[in-house]
Amino acid sequence: MIYFDHAATTPIAPKVLKAMEPYFSEKFGNPSSIYRIGREAKSILEEARKTAADILGAESPMEIVFTSGATESSNLGIKGAMEAAAFETGSRVHVLTTAIEHHSVLDTVKHLEKSFGAETTFLSVTREGLADPKDLSKAIKDNTAVISVMSGNNEMGALQPIEEIAQIIELEKERRKKQGIETPLVFHVDAVQSFAFKKISLKDLPIDMLSLTAHKFYGPKGVGLLYVRQGTKFNSQQKGGAQEKGRRAGTENVPYIVGMVKAMQIADEKRDKYSKKITSFTNYLVEKVTAEIQNVELIGPKSNQSRLPHIATFLFKGVEGESVLLNLDMLDIAASSGSACTSGSLEPSHVTKAMGYDDLSAHGAVRFSLGELNKKSDIDKLMENLPGIIDKLRAMSPVKG
Ligand SMILES: Cc1ncc(COP(=O)(O)O)c(C=O)c1O
């Protein structure tokens, strides 16, 4: 198989799997138990928390809450902070996000509007998929309690100006302090796609909450974390035991947490080398596709500075992305028609729509996301077949490309 879908998921790295193994069998204790193997599990859990905190540049390990993945992290962070702010102020609060977030954020915000009566704003983006910090600044209100902006987009790779946005939010916090506005303001970032490529140091970057999921960087599926800066108020969502200091009930998934933190360590060590390698592969792919196929557009930012190294999404005019994928699958080549989380539905992506593409063009989107499983020769193999597939589909299509 040739695998071009690393933005959907990645295989577990052998070192990660090895690190996890003892915690399924001989070291199976529950971290809440008081006898030896329980205490050992607790100690490994706390060691993992400290390592994760150090990698992220957090001030304290207590700022890390382990979860089942980024979907849960973003639900917990955004809903939790909105609830806490509404409770504290006794009034309706506002949440501000972008129109191109992953559904785990977008649908959480929509849920808050419907079920919680929250005020919401979905910022529009440019044709290249970038949010404008000036627009964001203008959209902040006195009752804005949460601002959530993803660092790297999973469908077309745009890197948002998180540093600039963080500065705007810091200024807003100062203004509120001076003017005695009591609504707390929380900045949440979904860093799922960027973590393996772009170092985030929370020492230098004033982000209040950050979501990660392990399976996007060669860790296991079903485990993630939410970073919460000390002093940030949020209500727990999952009720039950007192695990994670009462912030997330449920027995901790020790083997998976160990695996995630090992994967974080490896990603952190390899980041620069990995980014360089994947950038060169993706650049090669983009060059080849745009040179050898007519009427094709790379969507998202054009400059490498503003895009994730591993994602290249093309609009092939006059064809259905899904048909391209089926033809590639017959050759055992795996790619995606956009966000893996919405594939299976034929609805055009909310991301391409927000970037101003019409439904017909959006249907022609195919995302290739590169990673450890790729060699340069995979791109050559793809390019032996892709131009023919596009020609064949265009010849069959009633819509002219
Ligand atoms: C940007 C982004 N955020 C959040 C998620 C959700 O991650 P998970 O399904 O592991 O909870 C994904 C997964 O596709 C993603 O790409």
Image (spheres, rainbow, N blue to C red):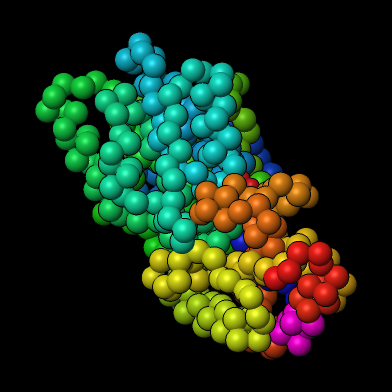
- Furthest-left residue in this view: 178
Residue drawn at x 51%, y 32% as measured from the top left: 109
The answer to whether residue 144 is left or right of residue 82 is left
Indicate the quadrant containing the C terminus: top left, top right, bottom left or bottom right. bottom right
The answer to whether residue 112 is left or right of residue 382 is left
Residue 122 in percent (x, y) is at 45, 38
Residue 71 in percent (x, y) is at 59, 41
Task: Answer yes or no: is residue 265 visible.
Answer: no
Residue 95 in percent (x, y) is at 41, 31
Specify start and end residues of the magenta stretch as a single range: 382-388
The answer to whether residue 268 is left or right of residue 207 is right
In the image, 357 versus 68, the foreground residue is 357
- Choose top left, top right, bottom left or bottom right for residue 159: bottom left
Residue drawn at x 39%, y 51% as measured from the top left: 131
- Choose top left, top right, bottom left or bottom right for residue 290: bottom right
Residue drawn at x 56%, y 71% as measured from the top left: 298
Q: Is residue 204 magenta?
A: no
Residue drawn at x 42%, y 73% as measured from the top left: 303
The answer to whether residue 197 is left or right of residue 361 is left
Q: Is residue 383 magenta?
A: yes
Q: In the rendered image of this protein, does residue 376 appear above or below residue 118?
A: below
Indicate the quadrant containing the N terminus: top left, top right, bottom left or bottom right. bottom right
Residue 80 in percent (x, y) is at 47, 27
Q: In the rendered image of this protein, does residue 28 appear above or below residue 17?
A: above
Q: Main secondary structure of the magenta part?
A: helix
Task: Answer yes or no: is residue 112 visible.
Answer: yes
- Furthest-top residue in this view: 90
